[in-house]
Amino acid sequence: MYRYILFIRIIITLNPGIMTSRRFKRILGNGLLIALPLGIVLYILARLVAGLEVVIQPVAEALHIQKLLGELTLTILSVFVIILIVIFLGLLMQLPFVASFSKQLEGIAFVFSLPWRN
């Protein structure tokens, strides 16, 4: 029974005849709230990987591992370095000073977030 109700709710949501301007604005706003931060994160991650490939390339050439895993060796090493950095930052979050600083940053970010949902 629940599946049918869920199916009907999806049909009503996607039906353009029932779509009001308020519902459309809310759907568009929710889509932007997901797409913009995700796009920014992916862009920054791609730029970070490209930058780390440039930094890692001389080290990989010196160790003769530049083509060890094919063309993606530098990318794999860059992602591995990013994972190590994230683990290190996670360990830093265990320190009280860093954790309190993170809470302050969350408070500042919350002030700048817009209440899109009604």
Image (cartoon, helix red, strand yellow):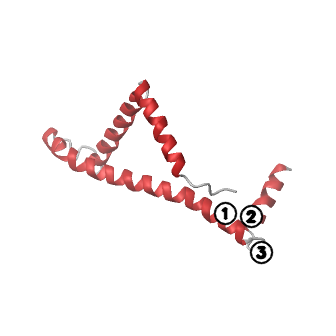
Residue type beneath disc 1: Arg
What residue did someone put label 2 on?
A: 13
The front one of 28 and 48 is 28
Question: Which residue is located at x 46 percent, y 30 percent?
Answer: 100
Based on the displayed image, in which of its 4 quarters is residue 12 positioned? bottom right
Residue 33 versus residue 106 in the image, above or below: below
Residue type beneath disc 3: Gly
Tag nearer the camera, 1 or 3: 1
Q: Secondary structure at mark 2?
A: helix
Residue 41 versus residue 95 in the image, above or below: below
Q: Residues within 10 Å of mark 1 (few under 14, many from 20)?
A: some
Which percent across, then down, holds residue 7? 78, 58
Which percent across, then down, holds residue 8? 81, 60
Q: Residues within 10 Å of mark 3 (few under 14, many from 20)?
A: few
The front one of 101 and 9 is 101
Question: Which residue is located at x 79 percent, y 59 percent?
Answer: 9
What residue did someone put label 1 on?
A: 26
Residue type beneath disc 2: Thr
Left or right of 25, for residue 69: left
What residue did someone put label 3 on?
A: 17
The front one of 16 and 96 is 96
Q: Secondary structure at mark 1?
A: helix
- Per the rendering, the mark at residue 77 is none
